[in-house]
Image: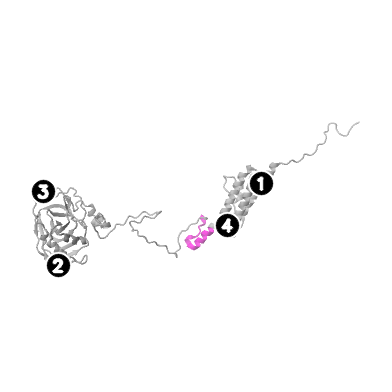
Amino acid sequence: MSSDKPADAAPPTEAPKQRFAPKLLIVAGASATLLLAVAGGAAVWLWPKQDHAVETKSARLAARRAAAAASAAAAAQPAMAAPVAAVVSAASAAGAAGSEPPVAAALAAPADAAPPEQPPTPAVVAEAPLDRLQRRLGEVLGPRGAVDPARAGELRVLARSSSVAPVRHTDTLSPISRPPEAGSLAAPAAAPVRRGPWSYSGFTGPQAWGKLKPEYSLCAKGQRQSPIDIREGIGLDLESVRFEYQPSSFAVIDTGHTVQVNVAPGNAIEVNGRRWTLQQFHFHRPSEERIDGRQFEMDVHLVHRDAEGRMAVVAVLLERGAAQPLLQTVWNHLPLEKNEENAARVQIDPIQLLPTDRRYYTYMGSLTTPPCSEGVLWLVMQQPVPVSAQQIDIFSRLYPMNARPIQQAAGRMIKQSN
């Protein structure tokens, strides 16, 4: 008997049962976390910025939620934790700083790809807090403090308001000693040269005479300067100096550098066939000239000039001893004020200033005060003249030191009469 079913037909099987797939669940959870992070970042980016405080609070809240989601995703799937955490960290940092990078584009684009350009939105166009601060500063500081659109985000103060007066500080530094300002681009200006009266000490002392005025340059550059330390003079039978001095009227003036006596015409010397007229004589303490290194209490310089304008100076060394009559007469007529000439009603004879022994040293030198002119004939008496301690003290009260330092002999010939 035949059957309707084929003999080789297989028995019917049951439908396959659906099994639980944990990997799919993990992937789904990670995807949900990623979408949540994207949604949070987009909310922070697109949220309208009504107020800086509200904006900052919303950004921080979104960052906290994204961080919590990232932590949950990292616990469920370690392999997905790193990229998600990186994206969430970037979104958190952007929200905390107030910047607005497009989070979705950052997630979709490769790491080395530039972010695609997007059309500006009201959130992008909205003014950032730093730009707002810069704009407000620009309003206070004036037109030059306005925001530069090309350099948004920079805080630059270009100029102060014209209505605000600068603060001025007073200092005690002179223009020479004031240090240059740090960061100054300008080349440092040369220190100004001090110009003005010369002196025997301080900034206008002998070391600076050559810089005080151009006409004083020989004081620093001259090669035949005075005074010198007279040593190893060549002994010769020199012509005696012929002194043609006589009693004359005089006037005393305190020049601010020494006591000077102006003598009336009629006094002169003759030496080497030339005649020199006495102009004035003045004093120095201690002596400017030295003999073999010895310096004396004072000296007196009798200044002469010839018809051609050349100068000759007779120097007389003064040492402590008996009172000198002519010197006392001069002291008796000292003026009460500097640079005021006090004319005397008596006469003096300059011959009284000379020693008994008229032998002398001679050399070519210069004036010992500015402008330090060279070509001066010097005649230095070998024998000193005594003056009293009281007479020395009177001058010391006015000028305790008014002697130029010793200058280099520089190989000059020095003669001395036998």
Q: Amino acid at mark 2?
A: Ala
Say what secondary structure mark 3 lies in.
strand
- The 10 Å Cα crowd at callout 3, few under 14, some 14 to 19, many 20 or more, is few
Q: Secondary structure at mark 4?
A: helix
State the image coordinates of residue 69 (x, y, percent, origin top left). Answer: 64, 49
- Amino acid on which the number 3 mark rests in the picture: Gly
Q: Quadrant of residue 368?
A: bottom left
Is 185 on the left-hand or right-hand side of 360? right
> Does residue 234 show up?
yes
- Which of marks 3 and 2 precedes in the sequence? 3
Given contact means CB atoms under 8 Å apart, are the residues at marks 1 and 3 in contact? no
Quadrant of image for the N terminus: top right
Question: Element under label 1?
Answer: helix
Image coordinates of residue 363 in percent, x first then y, are 15, 52
The x and y percentages for residue 176 are 33, 56
| First along the sequence among labels 1 and 4 | 1
Near mark 4 (Cα within 10 A), the count class, few <14, some 14-19 or many ≥20, is few
The residue labelled by disc 3 is 235
Q: CA distance from mark 4 to mark 2?
A: 97 Å
Mark with earlier residue (4, 2): 4
Looking at the rendered image, the disc whose residue lies closer to the viewer, 1 or 4, is 1
Kindly identify which residue carries mark 2: 344
Mark 1–mark 3 distance (CA, rounded to whole Å): 119 Å
Would you name the residue on which mark 1 appears?
Answer: 31
Cα distance, mark 1 to mark 2? Answer: 120 Å
Instruction: Report x, y in % for residue 64.
Output: 61, 52
Labels 4 & 2 near each other (Cβ < 8 A): no
Dot 1 amino acid type: Ser
Q: Earlier in the sequence, mark 1 or mark 2?
A: 1
Q: SS for tag 2? A: strand
- Name which of mark 1 and mark 3 comes first in the sequence: 1
Q: Provide the residue span drawn in magenta.
A: 131-151
